[in-house]
């Protein structure tokens, strides 16, 4: 068999697979595994990336406005497989989970209340 256009016998052809009816758009993003829900406003922040930064800096995925108790880059949520952990990024006021100050990293559980400055978020998982 010729190497041009046919591929190697053990690897199939070099043709590109066509989308199926079940998944016509390969760029379709699946729903997030988890979210942070702002307790007062109800705003939902999907945790789509492996690292989600919370803070006042405009580059933060979870942007906090008008709360000087929140640092520019206050904390981050890290996805580790199917688990999520929160970590302080050296903020002045720290972060709290269910009223307890976080030292290092802490794994998040469904229903955990995260306090970042004067903001409170609830950690939720996809149903």
Image: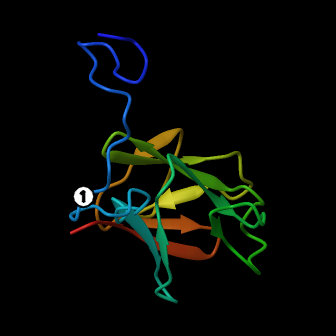
The location of residue 102, given as percent across then percent down, is 51, 49
Asked if residue 91 lies left or right of residue 102, the reply is right
Identify the residue at horizontal 74%, vertical 55% (top origin): 92
Which corner quadrant of the image does residue 3 belong to?
Answer: top left
Q: Position of residue 96 (x, y in %)?
A: 51, 59
Residue at 24% from the left image edge and 58% from the top image edge: 20
Q: Residue furthest bottom?
A: 41
Classify residue 50 as left or right of residue 71.
left
Q: Residue 31 appears in which quarter of the rendering?
A: bottom left
Instruction: Residue at 51%, 74% (x, y): give it.
Output: 120
User: Nearest the camera: 120 or 62?
Assistant: 62
Vertical position of residue 109 compared to residue 69: above or below: above
Q: Residue 1: percent from the left, percent from the top?
A: 29, 10
9 versus 46 height, above or below:
above
Most foreground residue, 104 or 38: 38
Element carrying mark 1: loop
Q: Classify the position of the C terminus by image quarter.
A: bottom left
The picture places residue 105, in percent across and down from the top left corner, at 48, 40
The residue singled out by tag 1 in the image is 20
């Amino acid at each position: 068999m010729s190497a041009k256009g046919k591929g190697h016998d053990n690897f199939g052809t070099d043709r590109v697979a066509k989308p199926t009816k079940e998944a016509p758009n390969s760029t379709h993003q699946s729903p997030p595994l988890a979210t942070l829900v702002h307790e007062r406003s109800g705003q939902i922040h999907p945790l789509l990336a492996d690292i989600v930064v919370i803070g006042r800096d405009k580059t933060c995925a979870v942007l906090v406005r008008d709360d000087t108790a929140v640092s520019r880059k206050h904390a981050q949520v890290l996805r580790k497989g199917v688990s999520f952990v929160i970590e302080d990024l050296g903020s002045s006021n720290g972060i709290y989970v269910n009223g307890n100050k976080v030292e290092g990293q802490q794994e998040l559980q469904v229903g955990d209340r995260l306090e970042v400055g004067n903001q409170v978020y609830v950690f939720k998982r996809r149903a």
